[in-house]
Amino acid sequence: MRHMRSLVLFLTLMAVPFGAASADTGKDDGQKIIRNGEQASIKGPASCFTGNVRIDPLYPANNAMRSSGGVTFEPGARSNWHVHPVGQVLIVTAGLGLTQEWGKPVQIIRPGDVVICPVGVKHWHGAAPNSSMTHISICEEKEPGKVVQWLEPVTDAQYDAR
Ligand code: MN
């Protein structure tokens, strides 16, 4: 249950507009700086991830702006298989990672690599077996809070099929 609450919190955080922003006008109070340390990290729930995963929220959806989260996978940790209703961009910032599209080979991803996950394409991403991996994930919402549809875990056999 704690994991589910974390997930709900994560998805809720991603959907909460800032301050006095108005959904009607798209105008807000102006530039906002979210200071380092203001947003608590969230443990990636076991219902969505294998291994230890930390989600560092970056900014929530805000009128025309969309949502994102920085995600760190410890060695061997990975997401479940999943799809994004409006797609996703991954910007790898540290470590060594892996990603796979359903039906295609596992691919290595490195810092500076940008991965585009198209709408509705089933995939997973995570860390290599002996290295952590951090990426910034940018997802757009199809409706408030809905940036991902989670599917089954990536099995060890799938993860090891490199
Ligand atoms: Mn994804």
Image: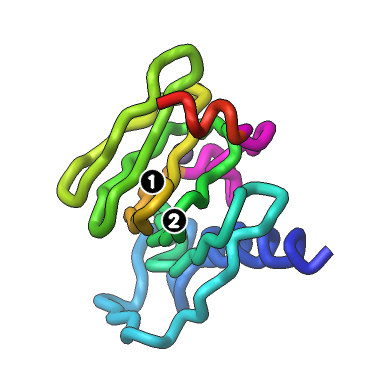
Q: Does the magenta stretch include residue 9?
A: no
Q: Do the residues labelled 2 and 1 touch (CB within 8 Å)?
A: yes
Going 45% across and 73% down the picture, which residue do you hit? 18
Residue hosting label 2: 75
- Camera sees residue 25: no
**SS assignment at label 1:** loop
Q: Which of marks 2 and 1 is nearer the N terminus?
A: 2
- Mark pair 2, 1: CA separation: 6 Å
Amino acid beneath label 2: Pro
In magenta, the rendered stretch is 141-155
Q: Which colour assignment does the render follow?
A: rainbow
Q: Give the residue drawn at x 42%, y 33%.
A: 87
Q: In this view, does 147 lie to the left or right of 133?
A: right
The percent coordinates of residue 34 (x first, y second) are: 34, 80
Disc 2 on helix, strand or loop?
Answer: loop
Judge the density around disc 1: few (<14), some (14-19), many (≥20) Cα neighbours within 10 Å: many
